[in-house]
Amino acid sequence: MTARCVVAGLVMLAALAPWARTPAHAQDIINIAAVVNDDVISMFDLLGRTRLVLMTTGLQDSAETRRRLVPQILRSLIDERLQIQEAKRLTISVTPEEIKDAYTELEKQNNIPPGALADVLKRAGVDISTLEAQVRAALSWNKILRRQVRNVVQVGNDEVDEFLARLEAARGKPQSLVSEIFLAVDSIDQDDAVRNSAMRLADQLKAGAPFDAMAKQFSQSATTAAGGDLGWMLQGEMPEELDTVVQRLEPGQMSAPTRSIAGYHILLLRDRRVMQAAAPSGEELLGLRHIFLRLPQGGGKKEAENAFRLANTLRENAQDCADMIKLKGEVSGAPFPLPEQAKLSDLSQELRAVLTTLDVGKASEPLVVSGGVLVVMVCERKAKSDLPPRNQIEEGLLNQRLDIQARRYMRDLRRAAYVDMRV
Protein backbone atom coordinates (compact mmCIF):
# COMPACT_ATOMS: atom_id res chain seq x y z
CA MET A 1 0.00 0.00 0.00
CA THR A 2 1.30 3.43 -0.89
CA ALA A 3 1.57 6.43 1.39
CA ARG A 4 -1.53 7.81 -0.37
CA CYS A 5 -3.63 4.81 0.69
CA VAL A 6 -2.40 4.86 4.27
CA VAL A 7 -2.80 8.59 4.72
CA ALA A 8 -6.38 8.42 3.45
CA GLY A 9 -7.32 6.67 6.68
CA LEU A 10 -5.65 9.17 8.97
CA VAL A 11 -6.52 12.83 9.18
CA MET A 12 -7.79 15.55 6.87
CA LEU A 13 -6.62 19.04 7.71
CA ALA A 14 -8.42 21.17 5.15
CA ALA A 15 -10.57 23.23 7.51
CA LEU A 16 -8.25 24.37 10.25
CA ALA A 17 -9.63 26.77 12.82
CA PRO A 18 -7.47 29.22 14.80
CA TRP A 19 -6.93 27.01 17.84
CA ALA A 20 -5.33 28.28 21.01
CA ARG A 21 -2.42 26.06 21.96
CA THR A 22 -2.76 24.43 25.35
CA PRO A 23 0.68 24.17 26.94
CA ALA A 24 1.92 20.67 27.70
CA HIS A 25 2.66 20.50 31.40
CA ALA A 26 5.35 18.21 32.76
CA GLN A 27 2.65 16.45 34.77
CA ASP A 28 0.81 15.54 31.54
CA ILE A 29 3.94 13.82 30.26
CA ILE A 30 4.50 11.93 33.52
CA ASN A 31 0.89 10.95 34.30
CA ILE A 32 -0.15 7.60 32.86
CA ALA A 33 -3.32 7.18 30.81
CA ALA A 34 -2.80 3.47 30.11
CA VAL A 35 -0.23 0.73 30.27
CA VAL A 36 0.00 -1.60 27.25
CA ASN A 37 2.24 -4.58 28.03
CA ASP A 38 5.56 -2.86 28.75
CA ASP A 39 4.65 0.48 27.13
CA VAL A 40 3.04 3.55 28.63
CA ILE A 41 0.51 5.89 27.03
CA SER A 42 0.88 9.21 28.80
CA MET A 43 -1.71 11.89 29.38
CA PHE A 44 0.35 14.01 26.98
CA ASP A 45 -0.24 11.37 24.26
CA LEU A 46 -3.95 11.26 25.03
CA LEU A 47 -4.45 15.03 25.12
CA GLY A 48 -2.44 15.49 21.92
CA ARG A 49 -4.54 12.94 20.02
CA THR A 50 -7.71 14.49 21.42
CA ARG A 51 -6.69 17.88 20.00
CA LEU A 52 -5.97 16.25 16.66
CA VAL A 53 -9.37 14.53 16.58
CA LEU A 54 -11.21 17.70 17.55
CA MET A 55 -9.35 19.63 14.87
CA THR A 56 -9.98 17.16 12.05
CA THR A 57 -13.65 16.59 12.88
CA GLY A 58 -14.49 20.24 13.48
CA LEU A 59 -16.11 19.48 16.83
CA GLN A 60 -16.34 22.16 19.48
CA ASP A 61 -13.59 21.86 22.08
CA SER A 62 -15.62 21.58 25.25
CA ALA A 63 -15.41 19.52 28.41
CA GLU A 64 -18.50 17.56 27.37
CA THR A 65 -17.12 16.78 23.90
CA ARG A 66 -13.84 15.58 25.38
CA ARG A 67 -15.69 13.47 27.94
CA ARG A 68 -17.55 11.70 25.16
CA LEU A 69 -14.54 11.17 22.89
CA VAL A 70 -11.66 10.39 25.25
CA PRO A 71 -12.60 6.74 26.00
CA GLN A 72 -12.63 5.79 22.33
CA ILE A 73 -9.54 7.88 21.57
CA LEU A 74 -7.70 5.98 24.30
CA ARG A 75 -8.79 2.65 22.84
CA SER A 76 -7.47 3.77 19.44
CA LEU A 77 -4.13 4.65 21.01
CA ILE A 78 -3.99 1.24 22.72
CA ASP A 79 -4.64 -0.52 19.39
CA GLU A 80 -1.91 1.50 17.72
CA ARG A 81 0.53 0.66 20.50
CA LEU A 82 -0.25 -3.05 20.04
CA GLN A 83 0.34 -2.72 16.31
CA ILE A 84 3.70 -1.05 16.88
CA GLN A 85 4.66 -3.79 19.36
CA GLU A 86 3.69 -6.51 16.87
CA ALA A 87 5.72 -4.82 14.15
CA LYS A 88 8.72 -4.78 16.48
CA ARG A 89 8.24 -8.48 17.23
CA LEU A 90 8.21 -9.22 13.49
CA THR A 91 11.23 -6.92 12.93
CA ILE A 92 9.10 -4.68 10.72
CA SER A 93 10.15 -1.05 10.67
CA VAL A 94 8.96 2.20 9.10
CA THR A 95 11.63 4.37 7.53
CA PRO A 96 11.90 8.16 7.84
CA GLU A 97 11.35 8.33 4.08
CA GLU A 98 7.99 6.55 4.42
CA ILE A 99 6.91 8.96 7.14
CA LYS A 100 8.00 11.86 4.96
CA ASP A 101 6.05 10.49 1.99
CA ALA A 102 2.93 10.26 4.17
CA TYR A 103 3.37 13.89 5.25
CA THR A 104 3.82 14.94 1.62
CA GLU A 105 0.59 13.19 0.68
CA LEU A 106 -1.27 14.94 3.50
CA GLU A 107 0.04 18.29 2.33
CA LYS A 108 -1.14 17.58 -1.23
CA GLN A 109 -4.57 16.48 -0.06
CA ASN A 110 -5.06 19.62 2.00
CA ASN A 111 -3.37 22.22 -0.22
CA ILE A 112 -0.66 22.83 2.36
CA PRO A 113 2.65 24.19 0.99
CA PRO A 114 5.39 21.52 0.88
CA GLY A 115 7.12 21.17 4.22
CA ALA A 116 4.60 23.35 6.08
CA LEU A 117 2.60 20.58 7.77
CA ALA A 118 4.39 20.86 11.11
CA ASP A 119 3.78 24.63 11.25
CA VAL A 120 0.09 24.18 10.40
CA LEU A 121 -0.30 21.65 13.19
CA LYS A 122 1.63 23.84 15.61
CA ARG A 123 -0.70 26.77 14.96
CA ALA A 124 -3.61 24.44 15.67
CA GLY A 125 -2.09 23.35 18.98
CA VAL A 126 -1.03 19.88 17.83
CA ASP A 127 2.52 18.61 18.16
CA ILE A 128 3.88 16.91 15.03
CA SER A 129 4.82 13.89 17.18
CA THR A 130 1.10 13.19 17.65
CA LEU A 131 0.56 12.84 13.91
CA GLU A 132 3.80 10.91 13.48
CA ALA A 133 2.68 8.28 15.99
CA GLN A 134 -0.58 7.77 14.09
CA VAL A 135 1.15 7.59 10.72
CA ARG A 136 3.80 5.17 12.00
CA ALA A 137 1.16 2.83 13.45
CA ALA A 138 -0.87 2.85 10.21
CA LEU A 139 2.18 2.12 8.06
CA SER A 140 3.37 -0.61 10.43
CA TRP A 141 -0.03 -2.33 10.53
CA ASN A 142 -0.27 -2.26 6.75
CA LYS A 143 3.14 -3.96 6.47
CA ILE A 144 2.10 -6.57 9.03
CA LEU A 145 -1.04 -7.43 7.08
CA ARG A 146 0.87 -7.63 3.81
CA ARG A 147 3.34 -10.09 5.30
CA GLN A 148 1.11 -12.16 7.58
CA VAL A 149 -2.32 -12.10 5.94
CA ARG A 150 -2.31 -11.05 2.29
CA ASN A 151 -0.75 -14.24 0.90
CA VAL A 152 -3.30 -16.53 2.55
CA VAL A 153 -6.36 -14.68 1.22
CA GLN A 154 -7.50 -15.41 -2.33
CA VAL A 155 -10.56 -14.87 -4.52
CA GLY A 156 -11.40 -17.35 -7.29
CA ASN A 157 -12.89 -16.66 -10.71
CA ASP A 158 -15.97 -18.66 -9.73
CA GLU A 159 -16.59 -16.26 -6.84
CA VAL A 160 -16.38 -13.26 -9.17
CA ASP A 161 -18.80 -15.02 -11.54
CA GLU A 162 -21.20 -15.66 -8.66
CA PHE A 163 -21.06 -12.01 -7.60
CA LEU A 164 -21.76 -10.84 -11.16
CA ALA A 165 -24.70 -13.25 -11.35
CA ARG A 166 -26.12 -11.77 -8.14
CA LEU A 167 -25.81 -8.27 -9.61
CA GLU A 168 -27.63 -9.33 -12.75
CA ALA A 169 -30.37 -10.97 -10.67
CA ALA A 170 -30.71 -7.75 -8.67
CA ARG A 171 -31.75 -5.63 -11.66
CA GLY A 172 -34.93 -3.77 -10.86
CA LYS A 173 -34.31 -4.15 -7.13
CA PRO A 174 -33.19 -1.43 -4.69
CA GLN A 175 -29.56 -0.80 -3.75
CA SER A 176 -28.39 1.26 -0.80
CA LEU A 177 -25.30 3.48 -0.63
CA VAL A 178 -24.04 2.94 2.92
CA SER A 179 -21.25 4.17 5.18
CA GLU A 180 -20.32 2.64 8.51
CA ILE A 181 -18.41 3.18 11.72
CA PHE A 182 -17.52 -0.16 13.26
CA LEU A 183 -16.28 -0.83 16.80
CA ALA A 184 -15.16 -4.39 17.54
CA VAL A 185 -16.23 -6.40 20.59
CA ASP A 186 -13.55 -9.00 21.32
CA SER A 187 -15.13 -10.54 24.44
CA ILE A 188 -18.44 -10.47 26.28
CA ASP A 189 -17.08 -8.44 29.15
CA GLN A 190 -16.25 -5.60 26.70
CA ASP A 191 -19.77 -5.29 25.36
CA ASP A 192 -20.99 -2.53 27.68
CA ALA A 193 -17.87 -0.41 27.23
CA VAL A 194 -17.93 -0.68 23.43
CA ARG A 195 -21.67 -0.01 23.27
CA ASN A 196 -21.19 3.11 25.40
CA SER A 197 -18.38 4.27 23.10
CA ALA A 198 -20.61 3.73 20.08
CA MET A 199 -23.42 5.69 21.73
CA ARG A 200 -21.05 8.58 22.47
CA LEU A 201 -19.85 8.63 18.85
CA ALA A 202 -23.47 8.58 17.65
CA ASP A 203 -24.23 11.57 19.86
CA GLN A 204 -21.33 13.51 18.32
CA LEU A 205 -22.53 12.60 14.82
CA LYS A 206 -26.03 13.83 15.67
CA ALA A 207 -24.45 17.05 16.93
CA GLY A 208 -22.93 17.64 13.50
CA ALA A 209 -19.60 15.81 13.42
CA PRO A 210 -18.82 14.74 9.81
CA PHE A 211 -19.38 11.02 9.40
CA ASP A 212 -16.36 10.38 7.15
CA ALA A 213 -13.94 12.20 9.47
CA MET A 214 -15.22 10.31 12.51
CA ALA A 215 -14.94 7.02 10.60
CA LYS A 216 -11.32 7.77 9.69
CA GLN A 217 -10.47 8.38 13.32
CA PHE A 218 -12.47 5.67 15.09
CA SER A 219 -13.78 2.93 12.79
CA GLN A 220 -12.07 -0.46 13.04
CA SER A 221 -12.82 -1.89 9.60
CA ALA A 222 -11.26 -1.93 6.16
CA THR A 223 -13.53 0.94 5.14
CA THR A 224 -11.73 3.31 7.53
CA ALA A 225 -9.43 4.70 4.81
CA ALA A 226 -12.48 5.55 2.66
CA GLY A 227 -14.29 7.33 5.48
CA GLY A 228 -16.47 4.30 6.17
CA ASP A 229 -17.76 3.98 2.59
CA LEU A 230 -19.25 0.50 2.01
CA GLY A 231 -20.45 1.39 -1.49
CA TRP A 232 -23.71 0.24 -3.07
CA MET A 233 -25.15 -2.71 -1.16
CA LEU A 234 -27.81 -5.10 -2.39
CA GLN A 235 -30.59 -6.12 -0.06
CA GLY A 236 -29.42 -9.27 1.68
CA GLU A 237 -25.72 -8.60 1.07
CA MET A 238 -25.09 -7.37 4.60
CA PRO A 239 -25.64 -9.46 7.77
CA GLU A 240 -29.36 -9.77 8.44
CA GLU A 241 -29.38 -7.57 11.53
CA LEU A 242 -27.63 -4.76 9.64
CA ASP A 243 -29.61 -5.22 6.44
CA THR A 244 -32.87 -4.88 8.36
CA VAL A 245 -31.70 -1.57 9.83
CA VAL A 246 -30.59 -0.18 6.45
CA GLN A 247 -33.90 -1.04 4.79
CA ARG A 248 -35.73 1.04 7.43
CA LEU A 249 -33.60 4.15 6.88
CA GLU A 250 -34.34 7.00 4.54
CA PRO A 251 -31.52 8.61 2.53
CA GLY A 252 -29.56 10.92 4.84
CA GLN A 253 -30.57 9.04 8.00
CA MET A 254 -28.16 7.41 10.43
CA SER A 255 -28.86 4.35 12.53
CA ALA A 256 -28.42 3.89 16.24
CA PRO A 257 -25.47 1.65 17.17
CA THR A 258 -26.44 -1.84 16.03
CA ARG A 259 -24.92 -5.05 17.37
CA SER A 260 -23.60 -7.71 15.02
CA ILE A 261 -21.68 -10.84 15.89
CA ALA A 262 -18.43 -8.85 15.54
CA GLY A 263 -19.28 -5.59 17.29
CA TYR A 264 -21.29 -2.37 17.00
CA HIS A 265 -22.06 -0.60 13.73
CA ILE A 266 -23.29 2.93 13.12
CA LEU A 267 -24.76 3.00 9.61
CA LEU A 268 -25.43 6.00 7.40
CA LEU A 269 -27.72 5.60 4.38
CA ARG A 270 -26.41 8.13 1.85
CA ASP A 271 -28.62 7.24 -1.10
CA ARG A 272 -30.88 4.59 -2.58
CA ARG A 273 -31.44 3.56 -6.20
CA VAL A 274 -32.99 0.84 -8.32
CA MET A 275 -30.51 -0.97 -10.55
CA GLN A 276 -31.54 -0.50 -14.15
CA ALA A 277 -32.47 -3.30 -16.51
CA ALA A 278 -29.77 -4.76 -18.72
CA ALA A 279 -28.68 -2.76 -21.74
CA PRO A 280 -30.57 -3.66 -24.95
CA SER A 281 -28.91 -6.00 -27.44
CA GLY A 282 -28.44 -3.03 -29.76
CA GLU A 283 -25.81 -1.74 -27.34
CA GLU A 284 -23.63 -4.80 -27.83
CA LEU A 285 -20.02 -4.02 -28.71
CA LEU A 286 -18.48 -6.15 -31.44
CA GLY A 287 -14.84 -6.76 -32.30
CA LEU A 288 -14.76 -7.19 -36.08
CA ARG A 289 -12.44 -8.21 -38.93
CA HIS A 290 -13.43 -7.99 -42.59
CA ILE A 291 -12.21 -8.50 -46.15
CA PHE A 292 -13.64 -6.29 -48.90
CA LEU A 293 -13.25 -7.22 -52.56
CA ARG A 294 -13.85 -4.17 -54.71
CA LEU A 295 -15.55 -4.62 -58.07
CA PRO A 296 -14.20 -2.52 -60.93
CA GLN A 297 -16.45 0.24 -62.16
CA GLY A 298 -18.40 -0.93 -65.16
CA GLY A 299 -17.54 -4.55 -64.39
CA GLY A 300 -19.93 -7.17 -65.65
CA LYS A 301 -21.47 -10.38 -64.41
CA LYS A 302 -18.25 -12.35 -64.82
CA GLU A 303 -16.26 -10.06 -62.50
CA ALA A 304 -18.99 -10.28 -59.90
CA GLU A 305 -19.02 -14.09 -60.08
CA ASN A 306 -15.23 -14.22 -59.71
CA ALA A 307 -15.41 -11.95 -56.65
CA PHE A 308 -18.08 -14.17 -55.10
CA ARG A 309 -16.03 -17.33 -55.70
CA LEU A 310 -12.98 -15.75 -54.11
CA ALA A 311 -15.05 -14.47 -51.18
CA ASN A 312 -16.42 -17.97 -50.56
CA THR A 313 -12.91 -19.43 -50.68
CA LEU A 314 -11.74 -16.85 -48.14
CA ARG A 315 -14.72 -17.60 -45.90
CA GLU A 316 -14.00 -21.33 -45.97
CA ASN A 317 -10.32 -20.82 -45.12
CA ALA A 318 -10.82 -18.28 -42.34
CA GLN A 319 -11.00 -20.28 -39.13
CA ASP A 320 -10.35 -17.34 -36.80
CA CYS A 321 -9.62 -13.63 -36.78
CA ALA A 322 -5.89 -14.19 -37.26
CA ASP A 323 -6.72 -15.96 -40.53
CA MET A 324 -8.87 -13.00 -41.59
CA ILE A 325 -5.96 -10.62 -41.10
CA LYS A 326 -3.58 -12.92 -43.01
CA LEU A 327 -5.96 -13.57 -45.90
CA LYS A 328 -6.80 -9.89 -46.26
CA GLY A 329 -3.10 -9.19 -46.78
CA GLU A 330 -2.76 -11.98 -49.33
CA VAL A 331 -5.62 -10.76 -51.54
CA SER A 332 -4.87 -7.07 -50.98
CA GLY A 333 -8.35 -6.41 -49.65
CA ALA A 334 -9.59 -2.92 -50.41
CA PRO A 335 -10.51 -0.38 -47.67
CA PHE A 336 -14.09 -0.46 -46.41
CA PRO A 337 -15.64 1.85 -43.77
CA LEU A 338 -16.20 -0.81 -41.10
CA PRO A 339 -14.34 -0.21 -37.78
CA GLU A 340 -12.61 -3.00 -35.89
CA GLN A 341 -14.87 -2.28 -32.90
CA ALA A 342 -18.41 -1.03 -33.22
CA LYS A 343 -21.75 -0.98 -31.43
CA LEU A 344 -24.25 -3.23 -33.12
CA SER A 345 -26.76 -0.40 -33.11
CA ASP A 346 -24.38 1.81 -35.13
CA LEU A 347 -24.18 -0.60 -38.07
CA SER A 348 -26.43 -0.69 -41.11
CA GLN A 349 -29.62 -2.70 -41.01
CA GLU A 350 -28.14 -5.25 -43.44
CA LEU A 351 -25.04 -5.80 -41.30
CA ARG A 352 -27.07 -5.98 -38.07
CA ALA A 353 -29.25 -8.70 -39.59
CA VAL A 354 -26.16 -10.80 -40.35
CA LEU A 355 -24.03 -10.07 -37.29
CA THR A 356 -26.75 -10.43 -34.66
CA THR A 357 -26.70 -14.23 -34.94
CA LEU A 358 -23.21 -14.80 -36.39
CA ASP A 359 -21.08 -16.99 -34.11
CA VAL A 360 -17.82 -15.61 -32.82
CA GLY A 361 -14.92 -16.79 -35.00
CA LYS A 362 -17.09 -17.71 -37.99
CA ALA A 363 -16.91 -15.78 -41.27
CA SER A 364 -20.15 -14.53 -42.81
CA GLU A 365 -21.53 -15.46 -46.19
CA PRO A 366 -20.36 -13.02 -48.89
CA LEU A 367 -22.42 -9.83 -48.68
CA VAL A 368 -23.14 -7.61 -51.65
CA VAL A 369 -22.45 -4.02 -50.63
CA SER A 370 -21.91 -0.82 -52.49
CA GLY A 371 -18.90 -1.27 -54.78
CA GLY A 372 -18.03 -4.87 -54.02
CA VAL A 373 -18.32 -8.01 -51.89
CA LEU A 374 -17.74 -8.13 -48.12
CA VAL A 375 -16.90 -10.98 -45.75
CA VAL A 376 -17.13 -10.19 -42.00
CA MET A 377 -16.09 -12.11 -38.88
CA VAL A 378 -17.08 -11.33 -35.28
CA CYS A 379 -13.98 -11.72 -33.10
CA GLU A 380 -15.55 -10.66 -29.80
CA ARG A 381 -18.89 -9.75 -28.31
CA LYS A 382 -19.05 -7.49 -25.29
CA ALA A 383 -22.37 -6.37 -23.86
CA LYS A 384 -22.30 -2.74 -22.85
CA SER A 385 -22.88 -3.06 -19.13
CA ASP A 386 -23.21 -0.91 -16.05
CA LEU A 387 -21.77 -3.73 -13.96
CA PRO A 388 -18.35 -3.16 -12.38
CA PRO A 389 -15.33 -4.77 -14.08
CA ARG A 390 -14.10 -8.12 -12.81
CA ASN A 391 -10.91 -6.73 -11.32
CA GLN A 392 -12.92 -4.25 -9.26
CA ILE A 393 -15.19 -7.00 -7.96
CA GLU A 394 -12.19 -9.18 -7.15
CA GLU A 395 -10.56 -6.34 -5.25
CA GLY A 396 -13.74 -5.71 -3.26
CA LEU A 397 -14.13 -9.36 -2.29
CA LEU A 398 -10.45 -9.53 -1.40
CA ASN A 399 -10.72 -6.46 0.84
CA GLN A 400 -13.71 -7.99 2.63
CA ARG A 401 -11.70 -11.09 3.47
CA LEU A 402 -8.64 -9.10 4.44
CA ASP A 403 -10.85 -7.06 6.76
CA ILE A 404 -12.10 -10.21 8.49
CA GLN A 405 -8.56 -11.53 8.90
CA ALA A 406 -7.29 -8.15 10.14
CA ARG A 407 -10.07 -8.00 12.75
CA ARG A 408 -9.15 -11.48 13.98
CA TYR A 409 -5.47 -10.55 14.11
CA MET A 410 -6.25 -7.42 16.11
CA ARG A 411 -8.61 -9.34 18.40
CA ASP A 412 -5.87 -11.86 19.17
CA LEU A 413 -3.40 -9.08 19.97
CA ARG A 414 -5.88 -7.47 22.36
CA ARG A 415 -6.69 -10.76 24.09
CA ALA A 416 -3.03 -11.59 24.62
CA ALA A 417 -2.09 -8.12 25.88
CA TYR A 418 -1.88 -6.73 29.38
CA VAL A 419 -3.79 -3.43 29.31
CA ASP A 420 -4.34 -1.19 32.31
CA MET A 421 -6.52 1.83 31.52
CA ARG A 422 -6.21 4.54 34.19
CA VAL A 423 -8.55 7.24 32.90
Image: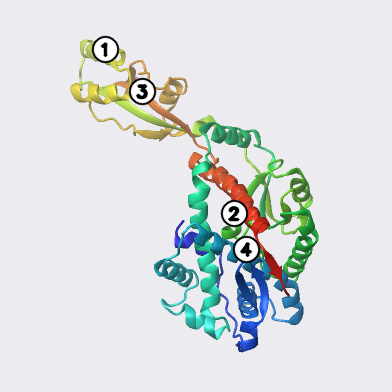
Q: CA distance from mark 3 to mark 1?
A: 14 Å
Q: CA distance from mark 2 to mark 1?
A: 59 Å
Query: Is there any visible trace of residue 371 in the rendered image?
Result: no
Q: Secondary structure at mark 3?
A: strand
Q: Secondary structure at mark 1?
A: helix
Which numbered circle lies on residue 79? 4
Lower sequence index among marks 4 and 2 = 4
In the image, residue 293 lies at what x, y percent? 24, 21
Q: Amino acid at mark 4?
A: Asp
Callout 2: 10 Å neighbours few (<14), some, many (20+)?
A: many
Q: Are marks 1 and 4 in contact (CB under 8 Å)?
A: no
In the image, residue 316 lies at what x, y percent? 30, 12
In the image, residue 47 lies at what x, y percent? 64, 79
The residue that mark 1 highlights is 313
Q: CA distance from mark 4 to mark 2?
A: 15 Å
Query: Is there any visible trace of residue 174 in the rendered image?
Result: yes
The residue that mark 3 highlights is 377
Q: Are marks 2 and 3 in contact (CB under 8 Å)?
A: no
The residue that mark 2 highlights is 222
Q: Amino acid at mark 2?
A: Ala
> Comparing marks 2 and 3, which lies closer to the viewer?
2
